[in-house]
Image (tube, rainbow, N blue to C red):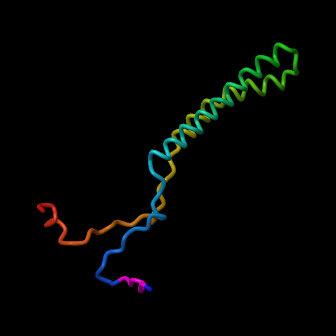
Amino acid sequence: MPRPRRHHPEEPVVQSVTSVPESLADEQAGRIRRYLVTMGIRTACFVLAAVTATKGAPWWLWGSFAVAAILLPYVAVVLANAVRPRLPGSSAPVTPRGDGPDQIGR
């Protein structure tokens, strides 16, 4: 049975993969997805406002859809531009083993 390896004080601490924040590409894909969903809801509200207004629905019903269709583009852009802040201390620098700058010439 292998013995568990103990950390020695002179060895650098390597960052755990589970503490790494979400990649920028994944975060951007999520923001794009939120934007497209919000704009899809906005399109549905616009169509519903037009249909309910022409079918004689109460003014508050088609008006609510119209207000939502007007305000949702603003909400979609704000959500698409909202980048989550990186948590302080969620990642630690990794110190390479060896002589540092002397390794570059090798």
Q: Position of residue 50 (x, y in %)?
A: 76, 17
In the depicted view, which residue is nearer to us: 67 or 1?
1
Location of the C terminus (image quadrant) = bottom left
Instruction: Give the prevailing secondary structure in the magenta stretch.
Output: loop
Q: Is residue 105 left or right of residue 31?
A: left
- As for residue 6 lying within the magenta part, the answer is yes
Q: Is residue 31 above or below residue 19?
A: above
- As for residue 17 lying within the magenta part, the answer is no
In the depicted view, which residue is nearer to us: 53 or 18?
18
Q: Is residue 95 left or right of residue 67?
A: left
Location of the N terminus (image quadrant) = bottom left
Q: Is residue 25 left or right of residue 57?
A: left
Which residue ends up furthest to the top in the rendered image? Answer: 54
Q: Is residue 7 above or below residue 60?
A: below
Q: Is residue 14 left or right of residue 79?
A: left
Residue found at x 71% / y 22%: 46
Which span is picked out in magenta? 2-7
Which residue ends up furthest to the front in the rendered image? Answer: 1
Residue found at x 41% / y 86%: 3
